[in-house]
Structure formats: structure tokens, C-alpha cells
Amino acid sequence: MLDSFLNIKTNQEPLEDFPEEINEKFFTVSEITRGIRTSLEHKFSNIGVLGEISNVRKPSSGHVYLTLKDKNSQLQAVVFRNSASRIKFELKDGMEVISFGSITVYEQRGQYQLIINKIEPKGIGALQLAFQQLKEKLEKEGLFDHSHKKPIPFIPQKIGIVTSPTGAAIKDILNIIDRRFANVEILIYPVKVQGEGAAQEIAEAITELNNYTDIDVIITGRGGGSLEDLWAFNEEIVARSIYNSRIPIISAVGHEIDLTIADLVADKRALTPSEAGELVVPRKDLLIEKIEKYKARLLQSLTGKLRLSKERLVRITNSYAMKQPFDRLNRWQQRLDEFAQRLNLNITHALNTEREKLSGIAGKLESLSPLNVLKRGYAITTRLEDNKSLRDIIDLSKGDKIKTNLSNGSIISEILSVEKR
């Protein structure tokens, strides 16, 4: 094709020598490069290329640059920002993929490359791979841990529902709740549940409902569909809004076989939207029936206790003690009189014994009293100034005053002289 392009361009055979007179027939580098680009884009347009990814680069521009290779060759490739934003999974080195696009030439470098418009992993769908990658990432971060899951209130006063207002899911949820517990309050936050911007709306709705102080539980979900239809509930932004919610969340996405990232992060997974209505409120009629049973059992128990108490009261009323209420009191009074009499006798005996002991001691003290000595003609002499008894002549000197105590009085004298023996 390139040869054809060159022949059309020059309309002559390739030159072996280059004389000066035909220099004006030479091609510029840009002309050659542009011709090659036109030829390649014409022949290799809208093709699929199987290869292994390497050298993935993601600059701030949003474009993705990579190399596709096999055992013998390699091909430079680029995914421009608009196409890169639609790729659900993460491009990693070593991943085998099928890339769809067109071959072109990057003229500034004279390098041919593949412009990728769509890319899929080999052997597994792109969305399935994206699901697995995000699941592994969030699981490592602990977003699925049971320790973080909050209990669903037994009887919520107010329920928030995040879903499409026109889908079958909201009808199923409302019908089930109305049938099971009709007077519970419900706040519906309408959102898109599929397509572009759906994940952002769902995440914002959950965040907004968390600003309400009277909502006890949130249900988020939609009816069944393909993996693409349910993809909004596999987005990371929705998973993190559920994880960060202070209000417990029930996820009800699709059918029983459908498992989403939202189901794994939520505090409770409902297999269907209808089951979400069953999980969020109990059956009111069963609760009333159970309360009536408890009421009957309580009444029966109280009646039995009252009967037993009445029988006991009758036995007490008919007892001897109640018929002769003062008989036991009189017997205790009699015993008290006996104790008082015995106590008086013991006290009188003890007083007489102590009185006799005291008289004996008084007689002994009387016989040793100095007054009795004085009665027998003796005297006791003390110094007048300090009233100390005189025992030795050396304690006196001329002029001292003394006091002589006799049995019937005392004499005060002054020492005229002291005579020692």
C-alpha cells in the first residue's frame, strides 16, 4: 500500500541515483510520515489486538499510556481520557487483554501506535474483573468486617428508602411494609439506579439521609437486571457511603443470585427488595398475638400468686396465734417477771456481800488511823510553815514555829532551843 502511495505520488520508478536535476522530487519527512499514517489508518482501522500489558503510565492528563506485547513484538498504545473514564477495571502490568481501536502514527516521533477505544480482559468480562479488583481492595481495608456492621432496629419509627421512584423495587418494598406494619413512617429519596451518574446520586442520597436525626434505618437497592444494569451498586463511591453511614443500611439489589459490593458492605443484605421489606419491620399481627399470649401468661401467673397468698392468709388467720393474740404475750410477760425477780435477788445478795467486805476493810483502816494513836496519848508535830511531820531534830532550829496535834486539838509553839542527844 505504501508502494502504491509512492507510485501515485511520483508517477515514476524508484531512483537508484540522485542527480541534482531531480532533487525537487524528494519527499519531506512529514510527507513520508503522513503517507504512512494514512496507509496504516486505512488498513488497520477498528481492529482487535490481543496482547499483554506492560509499562502502564497514568499522567495527570487522564490519558493512559501502555505497551502491548507478545513473545516476539511490542506495540505502543494510548487510551485517551474519554475512553479511559469508561474502563471499569484497573489496568495492570502483566494483564492479558483484548484491545479494540485503530493504528495511527504519532508524527512528532514517527512512531506508530494503537489508539484504544475499548479494552477487555481476556477470559473474563471487564465488569467482572472490576468487581473482583474492587472487592479485593475493600476487603483488605476492612469494609466487609462483621465487627463494623450495625444491628437493624427491631421496630423502626422511620425508614429511609434510596431507589428509583418508578421501578418495581419501591412498589414491592412499600407493599410488604404496609402489609406487615402499616403505620411506620417512610421517607423516599428518589435516585437513578443505573446509567451514568447513578452511583453519585445513590452515594449523595445516603449521605444526605444521615443528616436526619429521626431515621432509624435505610434501604437502598433496585430490581433485577444484568451486571451492567446493577453496576451502580458496585461503584466504590457507593460502598464508602454505606460504610461511613451512622444509620444501619439494608442492601436489596436484584435477585438472590445477584451479589454486589453494596451487599457486602451493608449492615444487612436482603436477597430481593421484597425481602428488605420483611427484614426491616416485623409482622404487626404476630407481635400483637405474641403480646396477647404474654398477657394471658402474666394474668395466669398473677392469679396463681394471689390464690396462694390468699390461702396463706387464711391459714394465718385460723392459726392459734391469731385466735389468742395475747396468750403468747402473757407468757412472755410472765417469763419477764421471773427474770426481774431473779435479778432483784441477785442484786440484793451481791450488795450485802460487798457491804460486808467494805465493813471489814473499814475496821482495818480504823485500827490504823493516826487519830486512834492520838487518843492513846500520843501527839503529832509538824512544822507550821509547810505542815510536814517532824521525824528528826535536825529539821528544827531556834525560832521555828511548830504545830502539835493532840486528840482534841492542836498547839502552836516557837522553838527556844534545840537539844540533841
Image: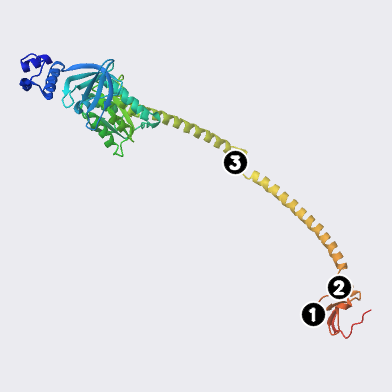
Determine the image quadrant of residue 219: top left
Q: Residue furthest right?
A: 421
The image position of residue 253, as x and y in percent, is: 28, 24
Q: Earlier in the sequence, mark 1 or mark 2?
A: 2
Residue at image point 74% right, 52% down: 343
The image position of residue 248, as x and y in percent, is: 34, 32
Q: Earlier in the sequence, mark 2 or mark 3?
A: 3
Mark nearer the viewer, 2 or 3: 2
Determine the image quadrant of residue 168: top left
The image position of residue 113, as x and y in percent, is: 20, 22
SS class, disc 3: helix
Q: Which one is in front, 335 or 66?
A: 66
Q: CA distance from mark 1 to mark 2?
A: 22 Å
Q: Which one is in front, 43 or 37?
A: 37
Q: Amino acid at mark 1?
A: Glu
Residue at image point 16% right, 21% down: 104
Residue marked by disc 1? 385
Residue marked by disc 2? 371
The image position of residue 102, as x and y in percent, is: 17, 19
Q: Amino acid at mark 3?
A: Met
Q: Which one is in front, 291 or 76?
A: 76
Give the side of residue 363 with respect to residue 293, left or right: right
Label 2 crowding class (10 Å Cα cut-off): few <14, some 14-19, many 20+? some
Mark nearer the viewer, 1 or 2: 1
Q: Amino acid at mark 2?
A: Leu
Residue at image point 6% right, 22% down: 24
Q: CA distance from mark 2 to mark 3?
A: 73 Å
Q: CA distance from mark 1 to mark 3?
A: 84 Å
